[in-house]
Amino acid sequence: MKIRRSQQHSQTKPGPGSAPAGKQPRISPSYSVQNESATGHSLALRFAALMMVLLVGSALCLFFLAQCLIRPSAQIDSLAALPAYNIVGKRNDQTTFWSLAQYHDLPPTSSDDHPFFALDALNRLNSRDHLIQLMQPDGMCILIAAEGAVVSSWTYDDLLQEVRCWFVDDIPCTYSDSTGQEIPGSVDLSMGWSSGFSNLPVCYTALFRPQQSAGEDAFDKAYASLVDDLQQLCRGRMNTFHSIQTMLTTMDPEAFTENGMTWDGANTLTNLGIEMGHVLEQLYSWGSFPYDLADPEHAADLLQDHFSEEGFSLQILRLEEFYLVLISRDTATLGLYYSPVLETWCGFGLQLP
């Protein structure tokens, strides 16, 4: 931007008290030059300062934007509501999963007056059976509740939205598999349902969280493994997904009604499980995917195209502790959590819409 200074003086009619024409007061040439120089110097300093502020502000904006796009894993907690950043750092504003998680950190409207032992907490909603089926296809794993540990649940009601949520976090337990490894951690359970006349929305999650954290190499290995599982499913090899499909289609609605969910909501949720189990079965039955692609990133791109051709959507999201695979059909979504620490699936969620 250029600043041009006019060198012409305007012709004005002398006013009262002005010197007669031809007898204008003399102004010292040195005084005029000094003022011109000082004024120009001041404008230059102001312009330089303004440009510096703009450059610094732009640099900060670009830095924070880069943090969001380049390091998506630091942006999302495992229970946070999406939209989220996917594995390649692109944001998808259309994907939502467990949208009721926004109520998780709000002050509870009521708490359980009768805390229960960790073992009882694990048995609620048949969560122990769900997670065991999910974590290891051969069923040779167990969740051992911490002796004497006591936990409590709480609910949150949104009267305006006619929604009720139920949460219980940090149920202490140990994961043990057929190899003899034992990994301490905790289980989180949550569900949400309509408290009005509508059967929607309805949500449910069950998730095991290992205490130890995973390094970048473990995340890379986990990504390749879960992509391989998806390739096998779409190639007509149910393998790991056979146990997941069985789990989804055998949920008991009474387990949900006993924990406060309405009967209509429980039926909607279990029917949703059956529907998403059939989605997996459909992907398996129509297996036509070119399995055994060596490059997981390339395979993931082709899998997204394959899911789209079958009328579904697929997203692989990297969270702080896990990968989350979202398989959607219309407004219904199945979420599957994969743990780099356990090297297996460790949680699932259902959501409608």
Image (cartoon, rainbow, N blue to C red):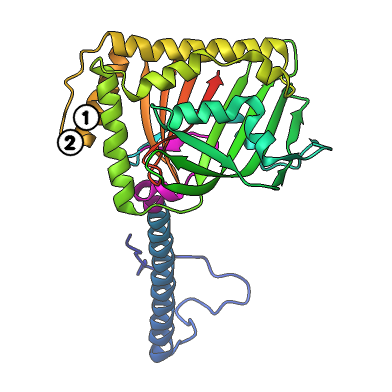
Pick the front one: 267 or 139: 139
Q: Is residue 103 visible?
A: no
Is 237 positioned to the left or the right of 243 in the image?
Answer: left
Q: Is residue 279 above or below residue 244?
A: above
Q: Residue at x 44, y 43 (%)?
A: 319
Q: Few, some or many C-alpha atoms within 10 Å of disc 1 (few <14, some 14-19, many ≥20)?
A: many
Q: Is residue 325 above or below residue 173?
A: above
Q: Is residue 87 above or below residue 247?
A: below
Report the span colored magenta. 65-86
Residue at disc 1, secondary structure: helix
Residue at disc 2, secondary structure: loop
Q: Are marks 2 and 1 in contact (CB under 8 Å)?
A: yes
Q: Position of residue 232 (x, y in %)?
A: 25, 23
Q: Few, some or many C-alpha atoms within 10 Å of disc 2 (few <14, some 14-19, many ≥20)?
A: few
Quarter that holds the N terminus:
bottom left
Q: Which residue is mark 1?
A: 299
Residue 72 colored in magenta in the image: yes
Is 350 positioned to the left or the right of 234 in the image?
Answer: right
Q: Residue at x 58, y 13 (%)?
A: 270
Quarter that holds the C terminus:
top right
Q: Is residue 132 visible?
A: yes
Q: Residue at x 29, y 51 (%)?
A: 217
Pick the front one: 59 or 201: 201
Q: Callout 1, which amino acid? A: Ala
Q: Which residue is mark 2?
A: 295
Is 60 positioned to the left or the right of 192 in the image?
Answer: left
